[in-house]
Image (tube, helix red, strand yellow):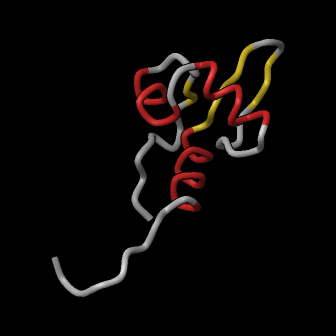
Amino acid sequence: MISLFDETRHYQPTDPEILALLGKKEKQAQMRHHGRSPSYYRLGRKIVYHGSDLNAWAQANKVETGGEGG
């Protein structure tokens, strides 16, 4: 499995990597509400994503394409 995120790092919704992957904080909130976001920790009002959870979420949403060669 390819690691897109540092497995030991904690990411915040405002980190550039998270904004690029999941979109603005409002969109992230909608994804969490509908159960479509990566696993996260809620520490009071603060949301934290763990790198290993982000990698697992990305792997689970991987789309395999058919066909031969490139």
Q: Left or right: 44 with respect to 4?
A: right
Residue 52 position in % (x across, y down): 57, 47
Q: Is residue 55 above or below residue 5?
A: below
Placement of the N terminus among the 4 image quadrants: bottom left
Tell me where residue 30 sits by quadrant: top right
Residue 38 position in % (x across, y down): 65, 43
Count of all numbered marks drawn on residues in the image: 0
Q: Left or right: 23 with respect to 35?
A: left
Placement of the C terminus among the 4 image quadrants: bottom left
Between residue 54 and residue 69, name the one nearer to us. 69
Q: Is residue 54 above or below residue 9?
A: below
Between residue 3 and residue 68, name the one nearer to us. 68
Q: Residue furthest bottom?
A: 68
- Residue at image position (49%, 29%) is 18
Q: Is residue 67 above or below residue 62?
A: below
- Residue at image position (45%, 36%) is 21
Residue 37 position in % (x across, y down): 66, 41
Between residue 36 and residue 12, name the one nearer to us. 36
Q: Residue furthest right?
A: 44
Q: Left or right: 31 with respect to 70?
A: right
- Residue at image position (23%, 87%) is 68
Residue 29 position in % (x across, y down): 70, 25
Q: Residue furthest left?
A: 70
- Residue at image position (70%, 22%) is 47
